[in-house]
Image (tube, grey):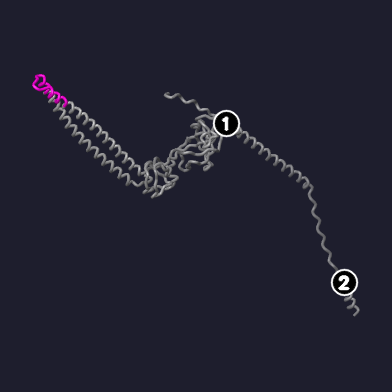
């Protein structure tokens, strides 16, 4: 019993002894050349960094030299755009539109019918002009008949005067009879002359009525509005039933002809620029294509001179602003149908000012 009591009173006596943890193995010792590898990697890294810096500096120097050399012989501006002929379609007669045959952005040929205007009023004017011309011709015919009668009467009176003159010389008639015959002859001559003048007036009236008829027919032809040239319909502003007036813009046609570039260069860039110098045009819509052209003309005034409110430097405080001069550049290549150049497109224009074109020969040589 004492043994059990001792066991209960001292629980540690019966518990097993704790196990000892195994000791961690010591790390292996580094080889002798590991200490030398770290400085070697640092030197390699420095060599690579310095090589990269050298390449960057050389590339930057080459790029800077080429840029400076390029802009010494070239002038450039991005204040440029494509221009083209835009032909307005304007009616010459007024009336209600009865038919519109085109839509926006549709291609049309020269002379193609675009729209028609009500022609009934003008047809009535043509009929009236025809009737007036017929009346004038009838009146002229009657006048010519009167002239024939007057000429016949004048011939008779002249013959009577000759006979009376012979009788008077023989004193077979009185002086009074002779004077009466002479007066009758002179009256018939005046009547014939008057009738001739009436014939001339009738002819002039016929010409006037013919001109009125031609004008009426011409105005009737204006009711059919045709395209002034080949191109693309834009800004269509007309519908069936609309009442239009002469001179009212209805639509516009952008011509199919070769477009050109208007580049607004600074006045300080024009020192070496001459007509005929080569140019490179970079269109924003086609960034990977360089188009070639040449300077065709340089404007005689700055763009500000044609502004709605041109500057007046003689009044108020003066602030000098570099002005821009429009320069027209035409393309050397024909238009590419796969890369259409549309009026108003933004471009970047570069002109090679190294070249000085030969002077043009005098006219006539």
Instruction: Count neighbours of disc 1 (C-alpha within 10 A) and say few if under 14, some if 14 to 19, many if 20 or more.
Output: few
The answer for how far apart the CA atoms under marks 2 and 1 are is: 116 Å
Pointer 1: what residue? 314
Residue 257 is situated, as x and y percent measured from the top left of the image, at 43, 38
Residue 123, compared with residue 328, is above or below; it is below
Which dot, 2 or 1, sits closer to the camera? Answer: 1
Residue lying at 81% horizontally and 59% vertically, measured from the top left? 24
Q: In the image shown, does 229 or 38 lie closer to the viewer?
A: 229
- Please name the residue shown 43% across and 43% down the image: 252
Q: Is residue 17 above or below residue 24?
A: below
- Residue drawn at x 88%, y 72% is 13
User: Residue, x 49% and y 31% (percent of image)?
Assistant: 297
Q: Is residue 70 visible?
A: no
Tell me which corner region of the image, top left, top right, bottom left or bottom right, holds residue 131: top left
Seen in the image, is 82 located left or right of residue 95? right
Residue 21 is left or right of residue 178, and the answer is right
Q: Which residues are magenta?
A: 164-183
Quadrant location of the C terminus in the rendered image: top left
Locate residue 288 relative to residue 156 in the image: left or right: right
Q: Point out residue 175 in the picture as x, y percentages from the top left corner.
A: 12, 22
Residue hosting label 2: 12
- Rendering quarter of residue 107: top left
Give 227 or 123, whichever is nearer the viewer. 123
Q: Is residue 167 visible?
A: yes
Dot 2, crowdedness within 10 Å: few (<14), some or many (≥20)?
Answer: few
């Amino acid at each position: 019993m004492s043994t059990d009591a001792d066991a209960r009173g001292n629980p540690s006596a019966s518990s097993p002894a704790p196990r000892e943890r195994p000791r961690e193995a010591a790390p292996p010792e580094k080889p002798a050349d590991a200490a030398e590898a770290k400085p070697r990697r640092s030197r390699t890294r420095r060599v690579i960094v310095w090589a990269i810096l050298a390449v960057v500096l050389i590339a930057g120097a080459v790029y800077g030299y080429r840029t400076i050399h390029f802009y010494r012989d070239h002038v450039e501006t991005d204040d440029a755009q494509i221009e083209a002929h835009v032909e307005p379609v304007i009616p010459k007669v007024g009336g209600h539109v009865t038919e519109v045959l085109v839509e926006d952005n549709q291609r049309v040929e020269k002379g193609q019918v675009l729209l028609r205007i009500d022609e009934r009023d003008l047809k009535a004017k043509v009929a009236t002009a025809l009737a007036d011309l017929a009346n004038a011709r009838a009146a002229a015919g009657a006048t010519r008949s009167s002239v024939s009668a007057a000429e016949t009467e004048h011939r008779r009176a002249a013959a009577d005067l000759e006979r009376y003159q012979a009788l008077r010389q023989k004193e077979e008639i009185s002086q009074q009879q002779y004077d009466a015959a002479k007066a009758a002859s002179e009256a018939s001559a005046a009547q014939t002359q008057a009738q001739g003048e009436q014939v001339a007036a009738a002819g002039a009236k016929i010409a006037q009525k013919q001109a009125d008829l031609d004008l009426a027919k011409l105005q009737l032809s204006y009711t059919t509005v045709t395209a002034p040239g080949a191109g693309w319909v834009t800004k269509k502003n007309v519908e069936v039933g609309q009442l239009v007036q002469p001179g009212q813009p209805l639509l516009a046609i952008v011509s199919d002809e070769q477009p050109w570039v208007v580049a607004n260069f600074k006045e300080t860039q024009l020192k070496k620029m001459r007509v005929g110098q080569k140019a490179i045009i970079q269109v924003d819509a086609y960034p990977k294509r360089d188009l070639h052209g040449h300077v065709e003309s340089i404007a005689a005034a700055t763009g500000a001179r044609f502004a709605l409110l041109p500057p007046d430097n003689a009044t108020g405080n003066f602030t000098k602003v570099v002005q821009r001069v429009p320069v027209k550049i035409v393309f050397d290549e024909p238009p590419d149908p796969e890369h259409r150049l549309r009026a108003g497109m933004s471009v970047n224009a570069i002109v090679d000012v190294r070249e000085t074109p030969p002077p043009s020969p005098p006219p006539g040589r």
